[in-house]
Image: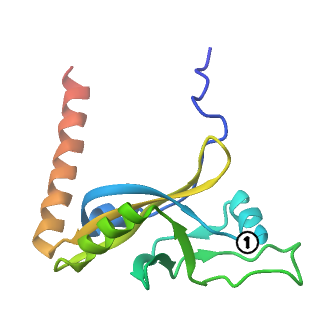
Amino acid sequence: MAKKPDNPNYKVIAENRRARFDYAIESDLEVGIILEGSEVKSLRQGQSNIAESYAEVKEGELWLVNSYIAPYVQAKTFGHEEKRRRKMLVSRKELSKLWNATQREGMTLVPIVMYFNHKGLVKLKIGIAKGKKAQDKRETSAKRDWNRQKARLLKQNG
């Protein structure tokens, strides 16, 4: 019999797979996000992209910039902008921690995954990250290839 999922409402909406390749993520944080009704409906259909987006602390608030949420077809007159800045919800203590982290040289806030949590609310996991150099990316790629090859050999011989 198939195992039941722990949270039946948990659903990944969008994932930034490139973030783990391009950045060395030091820590991550779950934040809420303020959305309009048509945006939530569009997210339930899975029409979004956070691959080119980033987060920034501006004027004492945390913002998600350049994230794409497709327009909801049924919301004709009360639709939303596709790539607007969206405010994220975070405590003051966490906000100051994020601001201090971004003030260090080379550090940035990168969205990793957007999902519906167990209560059905949209959450975003952002990471405090530092950009990788080309050499680091090659090492990551070589290590991943070696692990695949090792698993293949173990499967054949064992």
Does 88 sit above or below residue 60?
above
Determine the image quadrant of residue 123: bottom right
Q: What residue does disc 1 label?
A: 36
Mark 1, residues whose alpha carbon is within 10 Å: few (<14), some, or many (≥20)? few
Q: x and y percent of residue 11 in the render?
A: 61, 47
Determine the image quadrant of residue 142: bottom left
Q: x and y percent of residue 139 in the render?
A: 12, 61
- Determine the residue positioned at 59% across, 29% down: 5
Determine the image quadrant of residue 34: bottom right
Which kind of residue does numbered mark 1 sit on? Glu
Viewer-nearest residue: 140 or 109? 109
Residue 79 horizontal side relative to residue 105, left or right:
right
- Determine the residue positioned at 89% across, 72% down: 74
Q: Quadrant of the N terminus?
A: top right
Q: x and y percent of residue 3 in the render?
A: 58, 21
Does 74 sit above or below residue 59?
above
- Determine the residue positioned at 31% across, 74% down: 99
Q: x and y percent of residue 66 in the render?
A: 51, 82
Q: Quadrant of the C terminus?
A: top left
The residue most toward the top is 1
| Number of numbered discs overlaid on the protein picture | 1
Residue 24 horizontal side relative to residue 126, left or right:
left
Viewer-nearest residue: 33 or 72? 33
- Determine the residue positioned at 75% across, 77% down: 71
